[in-house]
Amino acid sequence: NAGVTQTPKFRILKIGQSMTLQCTQDMNHNYMYWYRQDPGMGLKLIYYSVGAGITDKGEVPNGYNVSRSTTEDFPLRLELAAPSQTSVYFCASNGLAGAADTQYFGPGTRLTVL
Amino acid sequence: AQSVAQPEDQVNVAEGNPLTVKCTYSVSGNPYLFWYVQYPNRGLQFLLKYITGDNLVKGSYGFEAEFNKSQTSFHLKKPSALVSDSALYFCAVRGGSYIPTFGRGTSLIVHP
């Protein structure tokens, strides 16, 4: 199993550009999450999904959009990139044990907006 | 609402000495508690979790954590630190919700 994979690993965007961060898991997990990590700030939840076709906002959703058309994929879309979106983005997933289940994280995407 | 506090931004310890990384939490109902480790330029990796039962939980790489309900704490420990343990450690809590809350992380530095 590859687990959770993310592409790209690195990206530099100009202000106002758009991009999609890809996330795929091969563990047949229903729950998927997008986090951003800023130095000294821990992880902030952007969006999450409890299954295909169902998504919901997390703590910091502004400036982002998501979709979940399949169980495996959970892409994160930035429509108009801003310097405040410079961060490291992590995708995570877990299975049906809910609150007791361990999250599995991808390797991250480091995004810089200039 | 649920919350997690990791009161130390950084912990320094000499190789071979015991280490403790502190975590306290607040949650309604029974807590589900997790420790994750992040090595440089990597994603978070699961270390251990407390769901129910024995208050002392053993995990990967020789780490363990003690659940203390009265002090609402879940401190991470290891009897003998290795230089390779140097990393960023995150504590996380879930209450009844499947959405976890993470602490801000503690940087562990183990000196040779």
Image: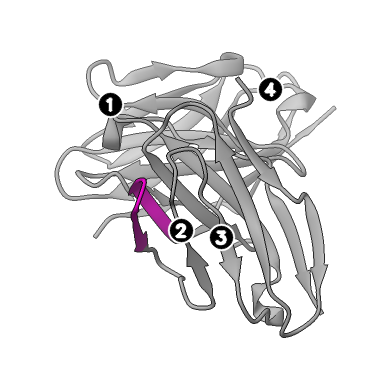
Taking depth in this image into account, of A2 and B18 the one nearest to the observer is: A2
User: On the rendered structure, is A94 left or right of A81?
Assistant: left
Kindly identify which residue carries mark 3: A76
Mark 1, chain letter?
B
> Which part of the image, by quadrant, shows the N terminus of chain B?
bottom left
Mark sitting earlier along the chain (2/3):
2
Front position in the image: A40 or B15 = A40
Looking at the rendered structure, the secondary structure element under dot 2 is loop
Side of B57 where A91 appears, left or right: right
Q: Which of A9 and B110 lies nearest the eye of the viewer?
A: A9
Colour scheme in the image?
one colour
- Whether tag 2 and tag 4 are in contact, CB under 8 A, the answer is no
Q: What residue is shown at x 18% (from left), y 38% (from top)?
A: B30
Q: Of tags 4 and 3, which is closer to the observer?
A: 3
Q: Which residue is mark 4?
A: B81
Q: Main secondary structure of the magenta part?
A: strand
Q: Chain of mark 2?
A: A
Q: Which residue is mark 1?
A: B51
Residue B61: mark in rendering? none
Q: Which mark is residue A67?
A: 2
Give the percent coordinates (x, y) of residue B14: 75, 29
Q: Chain of mark 4?
A: B
Q: Residue at x 80, y 80 (%)?
A: A14
Cα–Cα gap, marks 2 and 1: 31 Å
Q: Give the chain letter at badge 3.
A: A
Residue neighbourhood size for the residue with mark 3, other residues' Cα within 10 Å, grouped as few (<14), some (14–19), many (≥20): many
